Amino acid sequence: MELLKNIFFNTDKLVQNTTVKISYTGKFFENGSEETHIHYGFGDGWEGLSDVEMEKTELGFQCEIELLGDYTTLNLCFKNENGEWDNNDGQNYVFAVESPCLDLTVTDNSYSLDRPNRLRKTYIWNKKIKLAVYKILHFIPKLISGNYKRKIENQ
């Protein structure tokens, strides 16, 4: 996913409490810098401020960061080995961070397996009923046609 020119993420959207891989192909990569650090924080006040050295690859400088907390924005800027900054001309790189989608999460505990024994008993009764129906369906045609053997008691 490309959100800005020269900054790529390995995901379609940034989601709270996940890990994201960032690739940077900006001016430091284009100018041949050997070392680049990502300086990032969350929210308007840059909370949880961190500095991480990025790995230089053929695709640009890359690193993984964790999007911790309930923050709605991720702020980034980059610094090379010469102390030069790429901070989007003083505006920093700011990306929206979404809260996780909980639409498919079950919060009602009435369907939990708090009594697994009950499930087992239901399964056993289901098997018994199927076996009884099977035997009845095979015995009735034999009974009607008279084609069944009775055990004759030895006298």
Image (tube, rainbow, N blue to C red):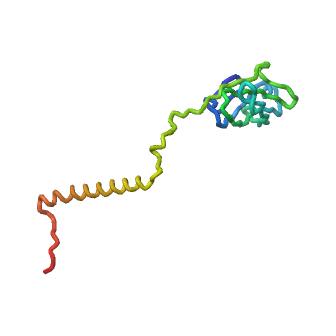
> In the image, what residue occupies the spot 79% across and 19% down?
90
Q: Which of the two residues, 137 or 45, is positioned nearer the viewer here? A: 45
Place of residue 108 in the rendered image (x, y in percent of width and height, measured from the top left): 48, 40
Q: Is residue 152 above or below residue 63?
A: below
Q: Quadrant of the C terminus?
A: bottom left
> In the image, what residue occupies the spot 59% across and 33% down?
100
Location of residue 12 (image quadrant):
top right
Q: Which of the two residues, 123 or 134, is positioned nearer the viewer here? A: 123
Please indicate whether residue 122 sits to the left or right of residue 53 in the image.
Answer: left
Pick out the residue farthest to the bottom: 155
Place of residue 2 in the rendered image (x, y in percent of width and height, measured from the top left): 66, 26
Location of residue 5 (image quadrant):
top right
Please indicate whether residue 151 sits to the left or right of residue 79 in the image.
Answer: left
Q: Is residue 135 above or below residue 62?
A: below
> In the image, what residue occupies the spot 87% across and 28% down?
83
Q: Is residue 115 above or below residue 69?
A: below
Q: Which of the two residues, 40 or 12, is positioned nearer the viewer here? A: 40
Pick out the residue farthest to the right: 82
Place of residue 38 in the rendered image (x, y in percent of width and height, measured from the top left): 77, 31
> In the image, what residue occupies the spot 70% across and 32% down?
22
Q: Quadrant of the N terminus?
A: top right
